[in-house]
Structures are given as C-alpha cells and as structure tokens.
Amino acid sequence: MTLSVFLRLAALSTLLAAPAAAQSIPSGAQRNDDDVRLPSGKLQREEILRADYEKNLEDTARIQQLAREIEQELKESGYTVLPTHSLRKAEEIEKLAKRVKGRLRR
C-alpha cells in the first residue's frame, strides 16, 4: 500500500468518526440514574427507598400480627388439632417475608 492510499484511508476514517463523536453526550452532561429528580425536586432514588421503607414497616407489622394470631389459635386448639386457617396465615407470612427480603436486597 502506498503512502497516499494510506493517508486517504486515514483521512476518510477521521471524517467518518467525526459525526459520531459530535453526537455523543459530553461527559459533564451525562446523568447517573441516581441523579434523576422528580418534579417536586426530590431525588427519585431517595423516594424509592422511602417507599420501600414504609412498605417494609407495614409488611413486618402484618407478619407480627399474623404470628400472634397463629400462636393464639395454636394455644386454643391444643396439640392434636391444626387449624387450616393457621396454615393460610403461615403462607401469608412467608409471602410477606419474601417481599421484605426482596426489597432489602435492592
């Protein structure tokens, strides 16, 4: 390959790359997902965390209530009988606990 062909290819590749570089976002204008602000001016991430916190408090309060109800039902029924609605409550406790665990992992 001669020098002139090489220079032409180099010039062509520079010209082709220039429009793509002009369209890219400048580094100062790039935004992180954590920097997204809501119309109220609050950070979106903080609002998500606050909502998750509130849901976790509600779900754990419900878990405690269901656990007390199951305990009371077991005391009333004795050791030979297992109320079926206690099993449903235990399944609801599992479901709520999985939700809380999932939110805590975020």
Image (cartoon, grey):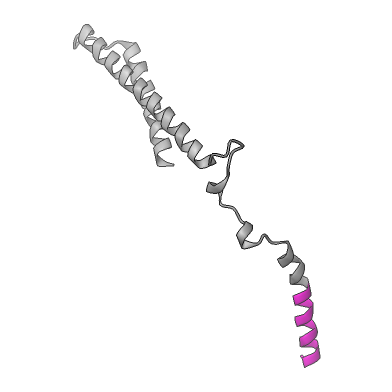
Task: Residue at 48% x, 40% y: name it.
Answer: 46
Q: In percent of the image, x 73 and y 65: which residue is there?
A: 22
User: Magenta segment, which residues?
Assistant: 1-15
At which x and y percent is residue 24?
A: 69, 62
- Nearest the eye: 24 or 13: 24
List the single residue furthest toward the left. 79
Q: Is residue 26 above or below residue 78?
A: below
Q: Seen in the image, is 55 located left or right of residue 9?
A: left
Q: Determine if the magenta segment contains residue 55.
A: no
* Picture layout, residue 76 above or below residue 90: above
Q: Can residue 57 be seen in this view?
A: yes
* Image quadrant where one finds the N terminus: bottom right
**In front: 93, or 85?**
93
Q: Where 31 falls versus 101 (above or below)?
A: below
Magenta: main secondary structure: helix
- Nearer the observer, 38 or 82: 38
Q: Can residue 2 be seen in this view?
A: no
Q: Where is residue 9 in the image (x, y as percent from the top left)?
A: 78, 81
Q: Where is residue 32 in the image (x, y as percent from the top left)?
A: 56, 52
Query: With respect to residue 39, does 57 lie above or below?
Result: above
